[in-house]
Image (spheres, rainbow, N blue to C red):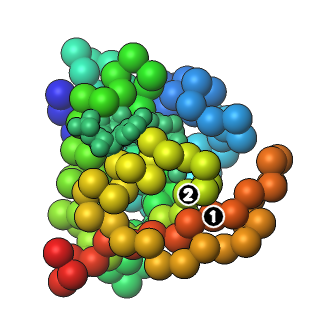
Amino acid sequence: MKIKRITSLDLAEITEIEKVCFSDCWNEHMLCRELELPQALYFAAEHKGKIVGYLGGHLICGQLDITRVAVLPLFRRKGIAAALFKEAAEHCERITLEVRESNAAAIALYKKIGFKEDCVRKNYYSAPIENAVLMSSDRTRQ
Ligand SMILES: CC(C)(COP(=O)(O)OP(=O)(O)OC[C@H]1O[C@@H](n2cnc3c(N)ncnc32)[C@H](O)[C@@H]1OP(=O)(O)O)[C@@H](O)C(=O)NCCC(=O)NCCS
């Protein structure tokens, strides 16, 4: 498995991952605009030349705010998301994210790789309405 920076050439594959992994998926146009932002930092995990997972967010003043992390169902529980976070951590001092309170898989992942829960934001998500757990991982704290 190889981790690489995402480029516009990867847009079609990332769009497919979005469709499979999220109900509020980003389309190719949205992804394209996202990747063009100067603060965008996105990585893909490639297996046999095919992108099977990706992660990214906005890097501002050393802090990476995660917008997306997803791994195709067939490739889950193989350490791919953890490897993507490890790569991202090389490029920042601190990582922050929010996650639906019911997303047990993601919360288990974040805790395993050293994220701490900072607070809960009530009714942050819509469709369905749900609380967000805000978490962060600090290089100096690890
Ligand atoms: C959350 C997600 C990204 C995890 O990706 P992954 O590549 O399977 O995660 P990893 O294999 O790196 O998992 C590392 C550890 O996290 C924990 N973990 C991951 N998935 C888990 C699950 N379904 N149940 C319990 N623990 C889980 C485990 O501790 C795991 O280590 P282990 O397999 O040795 O027990 C993936 O399930 C996914 O794409 N979900 C849909 C999209 C999503 O919810 N994104 C997050 C939005 S905030």
Give the residue displayed 77% in from the left and 66% down from the top: 123
Question: Tag on residue 103?
Answer: none
Disc 1 residue type (three-letter): Ala
Kindly indicate whether the residue at mark 1 contacts the one at mark 2 (C-beta within 8 angstroms): yes
Q: Who is closer to the viewer here, 4 or 95?
A: 95
Q: Position of residue 60 (x, y in %)?
A: 42, 78
> In the rendered image, which quarter contains the C terminus?
bottom left
- Residues packed near mark 1 inside 10 Å, few (<14), some (14 to 19) or many (20 plus): many
Question: Tag on residue 132?
Answer: 1
Mark 1 residue element: strand
Q: Who is closer to the viewer here, 134 or 70?
A: 134
Q: Position of residue 118 (x, y in %)?
A: 47, 78
Mark 2 residue element: strand
- Residue 96 lies in what quarter of the image? bottom left
Q: Is the C-beta of the residue carrying label 1 under 8 Å from the nearest atom of ligand 1?
A: no
Give the residue displayed 18% in from the left and 63% down from the top: 90
- Residue 80 lies in what quarter of the image? top left
Report ligand 1 position as a quadrant: top left
Q: Is the C-beta of the residue carrying label 2 under 8 Å from the nearest atom of ligand 1?
A: yes
Task: Compare marks 2 and 1 and give the one earlier in the sequence.
Answer: 2
Q: Position of residue 16 (x, y in %)?
A: 55, 24
Q: Which residue is mark 2?
A: 99
Cα separation, mark 2 vs mark 1, equals: 5 Å
**Residue 8 visible somewhere in the drawing:** no
